[in-house]
Amino acid sequence: MKKIFITAGLLLSFLSGYSQNKNTEKADKLFQGYEYVNASEEYLKLVKSKKADGYVYKQLADSYYNVFNMEEASKWYSKAVESKQDAETYYRYAQTLRTLGKYSEANKQMDKFASMASSDKRAKDHKANPNYIPSLTSNDKLFDVFDTKINSKDQADFGAVLSNDNTLYFVSSRNTGKKTDKWIDQPYLDIYQSTRSEDGTLSEPKAVSDLNTAYHDGPLTMSADGNTIYFARDSHSEGSYQKDTKNNVKVGQQGIYKATKVNGNWTNIQALPINSTKYSVGNPSLSKDGKTLYFASNMPGGKGETDIWKISINNNSYGKPENLGSKVNTSGRETFPCIADDNVLYFASSGRQGLGGLDIFKLDLNDKDAEVLNLGKPVNTEKDDFSFSLNLTKNVGYFSSNRTGKDNIYLAVPVCGVEAVAVVKDKKTGKILADAKVSILDSKNNVIATKQSNASGEVSYKVECNTEYVLQASKNDYDPATSNIAKTKSGKISVSLDLQPVEVVVTDREVLLDNIYFEYNKSNITAQGAKELDKLVKVLNTNPLMKIFVKAHTDTNGGADYNLKLSDQRAQSTVQYVISKGVSKDRISGKGFGFTELKVNCKPCTEEQDAQNRRSEFLIVKD
């Protein structure tokens, strides 16, 4: 089943009564050339000469926003919104306030944004839960996430379900059949299986030929004994469809089918009576006792694009479909239900507060007062995360995500209750350091979460049993420090993280900094980038005759012209940030080089090679 989304565009332009004019011509030209510091100076002249209006205040705020000066950005956004502005300005103002920890004020600006752009998903999310951001940070991590080795290189893989006999079933478009789904121009989905060994490794997947047709088949769910399955299938396979004469296509629907295992083969395939040529039913999940089947459908009577429903099962008799109601379903899209053996329902939703796209949620059906809970990171990301299944007998789960650009299957391991506590201190003085950032990393140095140390210099994390971790502390003007967390079964582990005052490496050729990261397709400076660039500012202040040339590079993904332009914008934003910190503009310049000067010459490139090519260099200019 292919996920299809229709995203409504947001109209961001509203007449404010203020606009560009001859007074702003010079400042506007600088702003459009990404010279944000000079632009802000020109806009400030207009403020001082009392020639500023709502447009000038907005442009001034945006200039500071782009170089991560949130204090000044907040100041001028507050002036800008005294007059009518476009919706995005209120959104950016809210973002600056959140960065400054002013959640209550940020919510007021989000209220205005939501009233102007009511159809925007960000607006809907805010209305549903205006305190979302501060509450999300208090959520404990529920699962650790790991890659699996069964994903195909270019095709979609999702819908993984682990049976009690260690067979992992999933669906994939990796098949080599000649038929393709004309709607999405991709191969049809087939059901595959892999055997999971005791150490968690998976065997080479093979197609389940008994269940596959020339059209879409899967995902599936199975009974506790593994001898009965329910699976989704395209109605084209049995010649059931409606003709769309206008577009000259045959429109099929997803249906749910039952199969039983006889002598190791799947046989006696039967369509469920809930199937229809007018709507789809799919993504089935069977309760432990085999008496309730949960599924997703866009059948009449739902609350959104697709809802989660259930039917009762009594041998070969099926009850009437029952909508799970507003506690689960929204006006958005709820899909991929999974009912675990402990009667906790997991499902994906685009209609609830999440990190982006589809997020995975859970609801304890044993507790009538329970609330729907977002699984949080690292299961959920800014991309689509869905198709979560959990085998409590094996204590492992699987889910799917397009976080790398295509649908892949990931392993989710429940986190148990070990507490790791870090105390952050100044290595030279022994002084307790509050407000230091302490990250917890996995054994491959992937950052899982980050918190700030309290007034006692402490940070605590609940971590998984019998697993190694790394704690890493960082603070402005200090080098990071790390400490390993050894495997333990339970209890509390305490470590000390002593930070050495920062000493940036300066060679005779360049100033060495960590990579400066930017948001996707953007060039404004982020918090991470600001932290690294502050080190450069310190070096320049210590060496008043030093001059720097910034070279910004990209990887080879995307077009040459696009990458050249984006890298140049990022180089200019980097330069502008340093200038905004008081460094003379004749001491730093920059240029984008796209992928014309690769550090690793590769085609195609691995993710690691791409990461090496995405870099900024800070060269010392010789007079």
Image (spheres, helix red, strand yellow):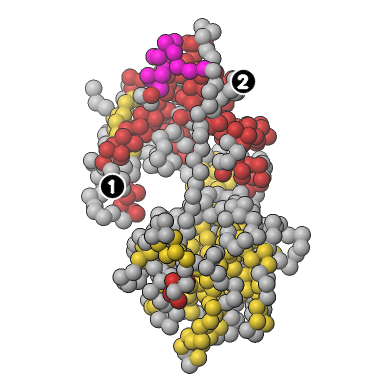
Estimate the x, y position of residue 366 in percent, counting from the top left.
73, 68
Name the foreground residue: 242 vs 401: 242
x 51%, y 38%: residue: 10
| Residue 88, x across and y down, in percent | 53, 32
Residue at 45% over, 29% down: 67
Seen at 38% across and 20% down, the residue is 30
Which residue: 65% across, 49% down? Answer: 138
The tag on residue 602 is: none
Amino acid type for the residue under numbered disc 1: Thr
Bin the neighbour count of mark 1 within 10 Å (Cα to Cα): few under 14, some 14-19, many 20 and up.
many
From what the image shows, is residue 256 above or below residue 408? below
Quarter holding the C terminus is: top left
Task: Between residue 114 and residue 49, name the one nearer to us.
Answer: 114
Chain part drawn in magenta: 18-31
- Residue extending furthest front? 245
- Compared to residue 545, the image places residue 246 above or below, namely below
